[in-house]
Image (cartoon, rainbow, N blue to C red):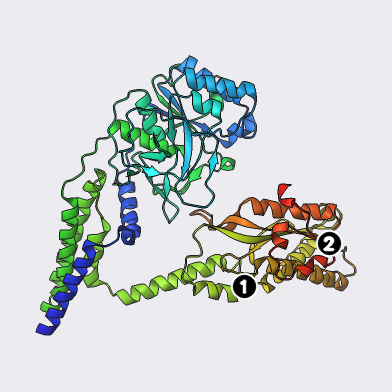
Amino acid sequence: MITRLRNTLILIIGLYAILLYIKPSLLSTPNNYLSDQYTKLAQNPTTPQDIIILDITDSSLQFMGNWPWDREMLAQILTKIQQQQSPKIIGLDILFPETKTATGDLELAQLAQQTSLCISQAFDYVHTQEKRQIGQLSPQTHSSLQTAIPSITATGFVGNYPQLAQATHCAGHISPITDLDGLIRRYPSTVQYQNQTWYSLAQAMLQTTHTPFTPIPANSQGIIRIPYTINPHNFQMIPIEDVLFGQIPPHTFKDAFILIGSSAMGLSDRVSTPVHPWLPGVIIHAQMLYSLKNQSFTPYPLMAEFTLTFTLIGLLLLLHPLLNDKLKRHYLILFGLFITWITLSFYAWQSHSTFSPALPLIILALPTLLIQPIQWWKSQTKNKHITRLFKNYLSEELVDQLINTQHSPLTPQQKEISILFADIEGFTLLAKQLPTEQLAHITRDILTVLTHAIQAYQGTLDKYIGDEVMAFWNAPLDQKNHAQLALNAAQKMIFDLKAYNQAHPNQPNIKIRIGIDTGTVMVGDLGTNFRHSYTAIGQAVNNANRLYAHAKTHQKYIMISESTFNQLSDPTLKSFTGVYYPPNNHKD
């Protein structure tokens, strides 16, 4: 008994020493989970009266045309707001990186110079070989900003066209930080790039209008937790076309903070947050604006010490089952500590104190949890999730290999892959000529032939798009000869389709055109909480899509890019009948 007690004490002391130096990243998931629950619990039903969102909705695009709109029209809308409504300031959650018409560009720049208009600029935080520098950054617009303020350092940016960037008196950044689970919880209070520093859009609007506010406490890197204080549905959101059509009552916007953003599906400005899986990005800036203006933050003192104290108590409770058989008392003590810590941490969390809400709870749970079954359950859950997501993309053999890999295959990443598009030639004409049932039967047959060819060469089936199929190689599993595998699959498609046509002489002769390109794209789980989707996005995808269209023009079955050709392990395959690569096709 004494030996057992001594060993347990040594274990506890060792664990406590480790906890003093534990990496915060190890606790990010449980901390985020608790923070998300606290966020939902603390939401305020208030409807802010002085923060109004002008929303570019799907109906706006129907009424006013597809995006991007003429800048003359945008200038007209902004002028109406300024002259007829007298808002305190207008914040644009929109970027204008490129010049358009001289008249529209000038009108927008003059408005930024002559009125209370705050423009946006976006930043990258990830270190990559290719630094993104699009448009021009506005000069630092607030003299109170000093480089000594904790700021996150950006690696690239998307700004605005020079005329607008130089004219404005107010510019803020609109670049939150996306956590590994895809949710947006954090926001840099300031961003630094090449010795200049910018506030967030919300804080820049308050600084420009000299509105009193209380800064949200930030960590040592200058990053704050976004206070989703208001229920997103409680913000006033008005379709922007109502301004153009004169449907806004007088004084609706008087002395209000106006934010212009978009909830339209086609503009891709929706984000996942702890309070909603798919919010318009402009809501984040509205939340920040409200909290800065209306909340005060007094961090609880000694929260780090409280955290370690509760953690040590949890470690000491590991001794209790060894010294006392009355487990009921043990569970009562644990329950009391759980409730006490959750209450204390909730109020400390509301004040934006810096601490780990999850650490004491995890340690308090150790005496009552069996680690091994939990690890087994997590492993099974992960495997089922991967299997469920990839069973429609990969063959069973590749799914098994994927489960055994160490890295996470779902995390989006920049990666070189080879992309293949295959399309049934003349499908529109077939659809007019054939009965629906026969057309559906033939389509299924052809897509099956194409899919078998993809899986035969270890490809990832991305999606069917009508009579078209998209696939790629080298993701999620690494494949050194991915370009060769893609071409091999394309050849098999041609041969297998020829055999299919011979086996069905009474059906129309089916032909396909194939395009293949190799390049670096973003690939990973790019879906939402509603539906996962493992796919690829990038210029190489667009190139491959265009190549199969060019194949018909060149009377070739398969058209590959020069980048694909250069990676073929067997370059002699360029002589294969129907394969062609146009020089410099990447410039098309």
Q: Position of residue 355 (x, y in %)?
A: 24, 52
| Relative side of 580 to 240, left or right | right
Q: Residue furthest right?
A: 506
Q: Position of residue 133 (x, y in %)?
A: 53, 41
* Amino acid at circle 2: Lys
Q: Which residue is mark 2?
A: 511
Q: State the CA–CA distance, disc 2 to disc 1.
A: 25 Å
For residue 295, what is the image quadrant? top left
Q: Nearer the viewer, residue 14 or 272?
A: 14
Please report the residue visible at 34 percent of the width from the left and 33 percent of the height from the top: 290
Instruction: Determine if residue 460 is in view.
Output: yes
Q: Residues within 10 Å of mark 2 (few under 14, many from 20)?
A: some
In the image, residue 286 sits, relative to residue 124, either above or below, namely: above
Please report the residue visible at 27 percent of the width from the left and 58 percent of the height from the top: 358
In the image, residue 248 sits, relative to residue 274, either above or below, namely: above
Helix, strand or loop under label 2 = loop
Q: Which mark is residue 322?
A: none
* Amino acid at circle 1: Ser
Q: Residue furthest top?
A: 83
Helix, strand or loop under label 1 = loop
Instruction: Determine if residue 249 is in view.
Output: no
Q: Which mark is residue 395?
A: 1
Please report the residue visible at 49 percent of the width from the left and 33 percent of the height from the top: 137
